[in-house]
Amino acid sequence: MSITVTVDGVPVTVEEGATVADAATAAGAYVPTLCFHEDHPALGTCRVCAARLDGRVVAACSAEVHDGAEVEVAADDLATMRRQVVGLLFAEGNHVCPSCEKSGRCDLQAVAAETGMLTSEFPYRYPGRETDPGDARIWLARDRCILCQRCVDLVRDDEGRPVFTLTGRGPDTRVELDHATAAGLSDEQVAAAVDLCPVGAILRKGVGYDEPIGARRFDVASVRERALRGERR
Amino acid sequence: MSRRIVIDPVTRIEGHGKVVVTLDEDHRVADARLHVVEFRGYERFVQGHPYWEAPVLLQRVCGICFVSHHLAGAKALDDMVGVGRAITPTAEKVRRLGHYAQMLQSHTAAFFLLSAPEMLFGVDAPPEVRNVVGLVEADRALVTRVVLLRKWGQEILQTLYGKRMHGINSVPGGVQKGLTVAERDRFLRGEDGVPSMDAVLDQAQDALRLFADFHERHRAMVDAFAPVPMLNMGLVDAAGDADYYDGRLRVVGPAREVVAEMDDHDYLDHFSEAVEDWSYLKFPFLKAFGREQGSVRVGSLARLNVTRHLSTPLADAELQRFHAYSDGMANARTLHGNWARAIELLHAAEVVRDLLHDPDLQGTDLVVDPGPDAWTGEGIGVVEAPRGTLIHHYRADDDGAITFANLIVATTQNNEVLNRTVRAVAEQELSGRSEITEGMMNAIEVGIRAYDPCLSCATHALGQMPLVVSVYDAAGGLVDERVRG
């Protein structure tokens, strides 16, 4: 059933069950997302998609709209909030875009550019994070992890067992790679896990820079263009 | 009373250093040193990164010769993954194309923007004239040609690497992409804002014309300016002639006789590095010759002293004139480094032309995958960067994490010759003079610039920090100082 909502005052019609992000896209308004993947249920972990629904700030990827809902996306305070959330993600990791092979196809980098986060307004923490290079095919670079949990929730072997898990609490939270389970993944499944990671935390060993600059995902079409045509992955 | 002269910063070079000249009570040079006072630490912070990131991360050490760092790193990784020199013809030629295109644009910048002002206006011309703006006002047409020539080289890099600076093309065992016919034709025909290949070959001879005119007008000065006899080193091919991408390291003495030759993998067996407490820059030397006699000169002048021929006709003809001028002996004249750079600029243009006509550039066999069993965990890559021999040496653990990186860059190799040149110029220009003029101070910088040093590369240092020249008396009192950024 179709319902009608307003996005920044513009009425749009969406299907019942649509999210704030869906409504924004229908209205041609860009809401950045990081942890959300179009093929999977919303995780709502990164909070980069902050928008306002009936006066309350929500995660646009997971909050559903209702008939007559009032959605705000473009307000300055929301844009600032989104930029600051992205800035916090940079400040609490160790992101070296110039040499990272995910550059040009990294959602975090692309969203940072779209939200105007050129340098974090928060002090960089330079955390000491241990890399796990010990798997035969996967290099786990925790420096670049934003704890979106895509890999934890969505990467499974053929038996449905998780390959990545979370351990620790608060600032000590980190992703662990189960090498034994990872060994059972096909090459295609490993490639899918690498592609699923929105940053350069999960890398395929020895395969870096396989796409020339100019042919990389966000060289071809920006994250904004992709989101506005409904592609969020 | 003895005096001490400081030039700080030395201008129109890459990076930050200072020159200190100490004069005795008779105004004679007691000591003269080039201090390099910056430090970075790339070799440390690449540790722990995946091995395949090293050439991409470490090229950031330089904004001028990043292709050289990228290629030296790529060759080291070829070694590490077990491919060695067995990359495909397409991969090697694509790498060479980028290498020589960079040589062309780097030499163009060094020759015209850094060294040419003195050739046109004189070493002691007023500093407000003796600069690139003065060049524009004096000969706008020449500067326009220079800008287009440099652009042509940079556009080739943009096409191959995706960006004019710090792009990516080489990967372990090969390259990401070749050159399409349309891309090639743009550079051959001169389309879309770049000059044609024919125009480039003409413009690439401007440097030789300018040097010839300068030499003709100031022959005595040019020839007598601070000669510094040294050993000379460069990469050579199997026939013993210069190859800027790959080969064996050859060292020649004063009669251009071969005094040492080595596989690049054996550099540690032949070279040691001395450290002085007044410079962050090390002093490499050949062990067999010792600290005093074993330092080598690298770069344009050294390479042309090493080689007998260049592989392209126009440049080789000029090389023979260059050799004949020194009666076949090694050329030790500091300002002839600019002549050598001009010859290499033309050579680079000719090599690029030949490569652009090679259909291998359109090949699709780009990467050799040797399989995991070929992994060696260690690699050494050597290329002739615009400023001279560049060595990247990496080790990685069995997981693929970099555990060791050593970068020996051209300016480090040239540290000793740079210091000897500073001393030679100081003795020629300052010794016995009671008054120190701006022109005399500039002469020291001219000597340094003849090597086109990159102190940022050499110390892997951060930021744009210029060089200082200071003169002190024997009691330590500052007599004169130049600080120009």
Image (cartoon, coloured by chain):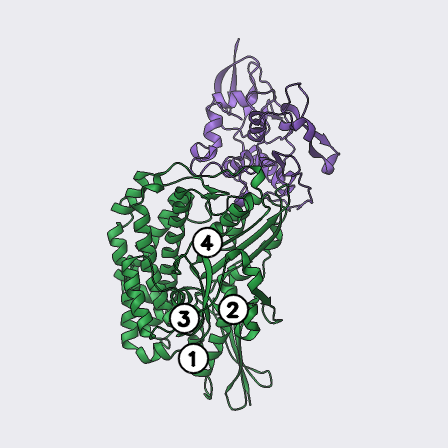
In the rendered image of the structure, the colour used to display chain B is green
For disc 2, the chain is B
Q: Label 4 lies in what chain?
A: B
Q: Which residue is mark 4?
A: B68
Hey, what amino acid is under mark 1?
Met
Q: Could you say which quadrant of the image residue A160 lies in?
A: top right
Q: Which mark is residue B273?
A: none
Quadrant into which the N terminus of chain B falls: bottom right
Callout 1–callout 4 Cβ contact below 8 Å? no
Return the disc, 3 or 1, that comes first in the chain's sequence: 3
Q: Quick one: label 4 or label 2, which is nearer the N terminus?
A: 4
Please rate how many residues cluster around mark 1, counting C-alpha atoms within 10 Å: few if below 14, some from 14 to 19, many from 20: some
Residue at image point 73% right, 35% down: A170
The residue that mark 1 highlights is B440
CA gap between label 4 and label 2 equals 19 Å
Q: Mark 3 near mark 4, Cβ–Cβ under 8 Å? A: no
Q: Residues within 10 Å of mark 3 (few under 14, many from 20)?
A: some
Q: How much space separates mark 3 and mark 4, taking CA atoms?
A: 26 Å
Report which quarter residue A194 is drawn in.
top right
Q: Chain of mark 3?
A: B
Q: Which residue is mark 3?
A: B256
Marks 1 and 4 share the same chain: yes
Q: Which mark is residue B415?
A: 2
Disc 2 marks a residue whose amino acid type is Asn
Q: Residue at x 49, y 78 (%)?
A: B423
Which one is earlier in the sequence, the residue at label 3 or at label 2? Answer: 3
